[in-house]
Amino acid sequence: MRTDSEQTIYLKDYAPTPYRIVSVDLDFRILEDGTRVRAQLTIEPRAETAPGTPLVLDGDELKLDSIAIDGAPLVLSAYVADANSLTIVEPPNRRFVLDTQVTLQPEANTRLMGLYRSSGTWCTQCEPEGFRRITYYLDRPDILAPFKVRMTAPVAVAPVLLANGNPIDRGDAGDGLHYAVWEDPFPKPAYLFALVAGDLGAITDSFTTMSGRKVDLAIYCTHGKEGECHYAMDSLKRSMAWDERRFGREYDLDIFNIVAVSDFNFGAMENKGLNIFNDRLVFAKPETATDANYHGIERVIAHEYFHNWTGNRITCRDWFQLCLKEGLTVYRDQEFTSDERSRPVQRIHDVQNLRTSQFPEDGGPLAHPPRPDHYREINNFYTTTVYEKGAEIVRMLATLLGEVDFRKGMDLYFERHDGEATTIEAFIKVFEDATGTDLGQFITWYLQAGTPQVEVSDSFDAASQTYTLTLSQKVDPTPGQPDKQSLLIPVRFGLIGPNGNAMSWSGVSGGTVRDDLILLDKDSVTLTFTGVANKPVPSLFRGFSAPVKLRSSLTQDDLLFLARHDSDPFNRWDALQTVSTNLIAEAAQGRRWTAAQADALRQALIDTLDNPELDPAFKAQAIAIPAETALGRHIGKDVDPDAIARARHDFVTTLVGPMADQLEARYDALTVPEPYSPDAAQAGRRSLRNGLLTLLTAGSDRGAALAASQYEAASNMTDRYAAMAISAHYWTDEAQALLGDFRTRFAGDPLVFDKWLTASAQAPDDGVIERMRAILAAPDFPRTNPNRLRSLLGSFVMSNPTQFARADGAGFRFVTEAVAEIDKVNPQVASRVLTGFRILPTLEAGRRDAGRAALDALKAQHTLSRNVGEILDRILA
Ligand code: ARG
Ligand code: ZN
């Protein structure tokens, strides 16, 4: 491995640079055979910098063409330039202009960081360290400067020239070239820089802000795709209005552009005034996009827009603080979706995602605090812990403070830190200062890795009408953090009486209880409630008020009681999930359920389906059977995925058998209005219908044919995809025919091809690895496109547990071989796929050894990127 792959960066080493960049003037000459970048950086030493201190700029795969200071070319002894840095040995002890020139080859940039070309369009991705692949710079988020950008390009291939901020000039440059000049008045770190040059179509619109300013909006895309950008535009306008209403945040430039590109390493990027998006999060039409796609577009458009304040106006001091902008912005986008759609349904969706992705990260070899204190490769820290656990932490803060005080703190944050690059500590401090609350213990959530486990026990004394509730917390050791501190855990709760109604109490002692909130702030808290008339059933962590694993002492009867009576929809859902999880997990470990247990759950599901007060989207979530991966996580050690798959299959068959008629009748009766609309109400009905189809396919012999006819009859992608994916997942007799039809029916649409790759990768039959090998080996497979690679390999590692973790190791080897190839092209995609191996410690010994052997071989046989090297070492540690 390369030597630099071992170097670790520590938070404790943070220090400001000796020089600051006052302003940036960039000139791009974009031609077919290369792009020449001239950078004129106005730089000055800080007051405390000793004269003669060298200036060290970052680079990455750069080659310097020329260099001057204040117009005078530098002699060779005055600087040292290599691919990764440029050092000015003795810079002037005053403000000066450093003028450099480099030439880039965007065509050859398959890593998709810096300036690259996607389907002919020149575009950039700079977060976190891509700008240093464009020019030598102090490429770190605490260096903020105003940028002016001039672009010159052939008018025939690049009639559209975009950069951050406002367009201030454009014109003819002769020889078939034209130019445009953009200026961004808001000082920004280089990671928010962007430019786009290409031949693009667009849709335009406008938004009038709360102070009456008109903002021009545009979404740029490949010609012909304009008609598929309207939902994204609608989402953008709703996001702009919501941020004004909910947080008082107004947009600040006169123009806001979004560009959809086909080759992109992740979802999207919040560059100032010029968001660049993976086109899968922009394009939507009913025939090719699912309800989930529309939902994702709305969410990510909002997310990137919200970054304008949480991320851009206020940014991060260093990359350890990434959670400052990401956790907060995810919280904001979750709130937006909750306000726009159904809050309980969104909450269940977000928690499911947290449990599916973040809990396993937090409980395995890749665990790290939301604010890490060291890293080798920062790109490996754009994780679900930083994003989704980060959002949960902000949500807990809002729960602890209440809506009004939370808003006070946010207002102070915007007021105090606008224009700054700041830290998690500064974020927490605004809430302390705005509300007079001590958050000294709370901040531990950011610093400590691992999911807390909360145990509950209770007792009731009828004679004294006293109810005693004990909650205790514990966090297992995580890599580098053997000892854990107790956290401040907000527990939203209620007590439910035998008639299903909320119960009151006359007094409580032993800890802090404020209205419906218990503060679990020690290892263990015992609360004594007096004046409690009957034995209550406690409903704890309502709305999932903290990201913990709850080990409750409730019986199945208690849980099904909650499923019927809890006023908190999240806990109703969770109670049903807990019952089925427990029954299947126990069966996988040899303790089969009783008929009475299955009957009771079946009846609870039917009652849920029949409850006219519940909305279809909620019912769809309520009747879902936990995935095999979720069951594996629940079991947690010595996992045998085949045993889980068998137990799940048996259980679903037991459960569905006696109610198959009823499910089918409901499936038939459930109509969805036409024409298709992606709104939450229609989408909810489709998801319930597809949830019923899933149960019928998983647990009876009638689903397969229903799925096949739904596939044929479908008038939208949601229903067609669901039918195909369910068939593939349960590997019905029709599955292969449906997959084959789907592939040809939508040939030529790359985003639909991704759906086919995803469904194909989830097939549980023994032939799946051979089929995937053939897909990858096909000469026309787009092997440099992240969406294609992730759809196939990401889906396989994350959601095909029986084949990925095959006992013979074939699944592991297939993935490590693919990772070795991808790593040469795009290390970020490769390392992301490799994280799927984090499950190894949970597997039974044979599979664990097979997985380690595949990783050992990867390490021994290949020169690996820093990205892959770091993930590999952490998993093998
Ligand atoms: N800031 C972007 C967003 O969350 C994502 C950037 C991801 N970068 C990365 N290297 N993974 O909106
Ligand atoms: Zn973000």
Image (cartoon, grey):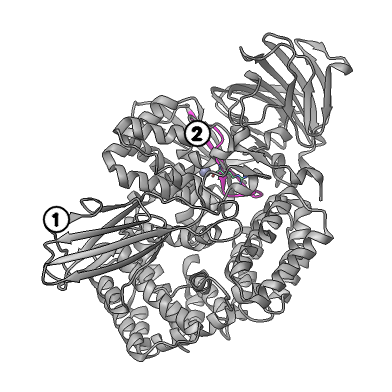
Tag 2–tag 1 contact (CB < 8 Å): no
Which residue is at 50% across, 56% downward?
Answer: 450
Q: CA distance from mark 2 to mark 1?
A: 41 Å
Q: Residues within 10 Å of mark 1 (few under 14, many from 20)?
A: few
Residue 717 % position (x, y): 50, 66
Name the residue furthest top.
Answer: 94
In the image, the segment drawn in magenta is 255-272
Residue 694: horizontal and vertical position, in percent?
Answer: 45, 77
Q: Is mark 2 within 8 Å of ligand 2?
A: no
- Relative to 200, residue 63 above or below: above
Three-letter code for the amino acid on which mark 2 is drawn: Thr
**For mark 2, does the 10 Å Cα neighbourhood hold few (<14), some (14 to 19), or many (20 or more) residues?**
many
Going by the numbered disc 1, the residue's amino acid type is: Gly
Determine which residue is flagged by label 2. 423
- Image quadrant for the C terminus? bottom right
Where disc 2 sits, the SS reads loop
Q: Looking at the picture, does residue 397 appear above or below residue 701?
A: above
Instruction: Report the residue marked by disc 1.
Output: 507
Where does the image place residue 830, in percent across and percent down from the top left?
70, 56
